[in-house]
Image (spheres, rainbow, N blue to C red):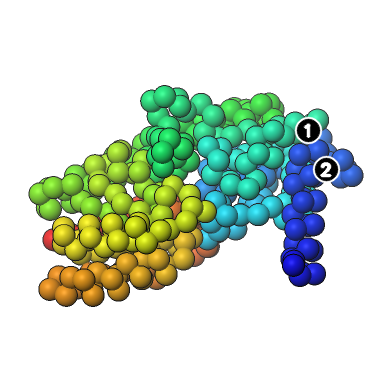
């Protein structure tokens, strides 16, 4: 039987989901555009960072999921309801990244408010990857060139919501897209040097399948303990397969992620040591060296911005996979 606390959580969640669907009619709303900065609600820290770069002084961004949050398992809160109601523009990743919030975001239609998915212009046939038996992979930001497409969509959504500042958004986006193009070239060059040093595709082992876009864009072979969503269960078969891969191919490092619990990879490492005692030490990359996947880092960390996140990841991967 469900406890009083359990019933309370369920009731709160149900109320939030209802409000997301029906539009929070008791709120006074965000007020007219132009009376102050454009109020933007962004589901993830990655989207929020792009909005700040493109919007500059003309936007006020609220991030629903704090830095370090796993969006696959995120449950909407009553505070999110208020944030949605007070926003002029609501931006989400789409491709079901937001998990339990996805159906409410994708079906939302509220007067005076725009809602858009930043991945909506990606070609589902040629750009959006299919994994886990045909599910669409939402981690598009790991191919910087695809994230540039999303940034352009963010720019257009800001301009539609706030036409008087459209020229400023256009100029900011052009500057930021040039920075991202240089970042994409930097990652390609570092990945190519690592591949040349190893003499084969580098093998990247992570907590879950967040890096498939990264692997295709930059020439890596990736394997995650969990599937594309951390909400998926990890079976003993998954663990055994990863242990066998590491042992048979002599993998030297496996990488934890800042927004995913590391206990699954700790179990893998223990099993590797037990089953392949002659294998040299396998490093569990964690702590400050953990990779950023579904979220940026907190302020003051290398991954506090999208550019910093991507650069930290490629540099850390190179550091631990370099022969």
Look at the image and tell me whether residue 52 can be seen.
no
**Residue, disc 1:** 110
In-image side of 67 versus 61 (left or right):
left
The foreground one among 86 and 247 is 247
Precedes in sequence: disc 2 or disc 1:
2
Q: Quadrant of the N terminus?
A: bottom right
Asked whether 168 or 243 is in front, the reply is 243
Task: Report the residue that reaches farthest toward the front.
Answer: 1
Q: Secondary structure at mark 2?
A: loop
Q: Residue at x 33, y 40 (%)?
A: 184
Q: Which residue is pictured at 80% across the width and 69% down the height?
A: 4
- Total number of numbered discs in the rendering: 2
Residue 76 position within the rendered picture, expressed as x and y whole percent measured from the top left:
69, 52
Q: Which mark is residue 253?
A: none
Residue 7 horizontal side relative to residue 187, left or right: right
In the image, residue 204 lies at what x, y percent?
27, 54
Say which quadrant the C terminus sits in.
bottom left
Position of residue 286 measured from the top left corner of the image (x, y, whole percent): 36, 69
Q: Nearer the viewer, residue 164 or 274?
A: 274
Q: In the image, residue 196 lies at what x, y percent?
A: 12, 48
Residues at discs 2 and 1 in contact (Cβ within 8 Å): yes
Q: Which mark is residue 24?
A: 2
Identify the image quadrant of residue 226: bottom left
> Where 26 falls versus 296 (above or below)?
above
Q: Image height check: is 33 above or below 243?
A: above
For label 1, the SS is: loop
């Amino acid at each position: 039987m469900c406890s009083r606390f359990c019933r309370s959580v369920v009731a709160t969640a149900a109320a939030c989901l209802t409000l997301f669907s029906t539009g929070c009619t008791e709120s006074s709303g965000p007020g007219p555009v132009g009376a102050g900065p454009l109020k933007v609600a962004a589901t993830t820290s990655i989207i929020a960072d792009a909005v700040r770069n493109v919007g500059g002084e003309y936007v006020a961004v609220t991030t629903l999921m704090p830095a370090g949050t796993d969006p696959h398992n995120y449950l909407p809160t009553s505070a999110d309801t208020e944030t949605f109601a007070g926003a002029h523009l609501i931006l989400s990743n789409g491709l079901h990244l937001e998990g339990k919030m996805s159906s409410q975001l994708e079906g939302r239609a509220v007067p005076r408010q725009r809602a858009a998915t930043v991945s909506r212009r990606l070609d589902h046939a040629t750009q959006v990857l299919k994994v886990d038996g045909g599910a669409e992979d939402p981690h598009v930001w790991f191919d910087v060139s695809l994230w540039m497409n999303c940034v352009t969509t963010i720019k257009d959504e800001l301009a539609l919501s706030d036409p008087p500042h459209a020229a400023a958004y256009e100029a900011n986006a052009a500057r930021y897209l040039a920075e991202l193009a240089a970042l994409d070239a930097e990652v390609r060059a570092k990945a190519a040097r690592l591949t040349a040093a190893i003499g084969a595709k580098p093998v990247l082992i992570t907590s879950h399948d967040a890096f498939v876009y990264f692997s295709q864009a930059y020439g890596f072979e990736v394997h995650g303990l969990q599937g594309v969503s951390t909400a998926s269960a990890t079976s003993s078969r998954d663990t055994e397969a990863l242990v066998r891969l590491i042992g048979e191919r002599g993998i030297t490092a496996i990488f934890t992620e800042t927004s995913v619990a590391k206990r699954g990879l700790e179990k893998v490492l223990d099993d590797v040591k037990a089953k392949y005692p002659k294998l040299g030490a396998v490093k569990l990359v964690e702590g400050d060296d953990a990779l950023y996947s579904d979220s940026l880092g907190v302020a003051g960390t290398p991954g506090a911005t999208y550019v910093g996140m991507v650069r930290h990841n490629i540099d850390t991967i190179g550091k631990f996979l370099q022969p």
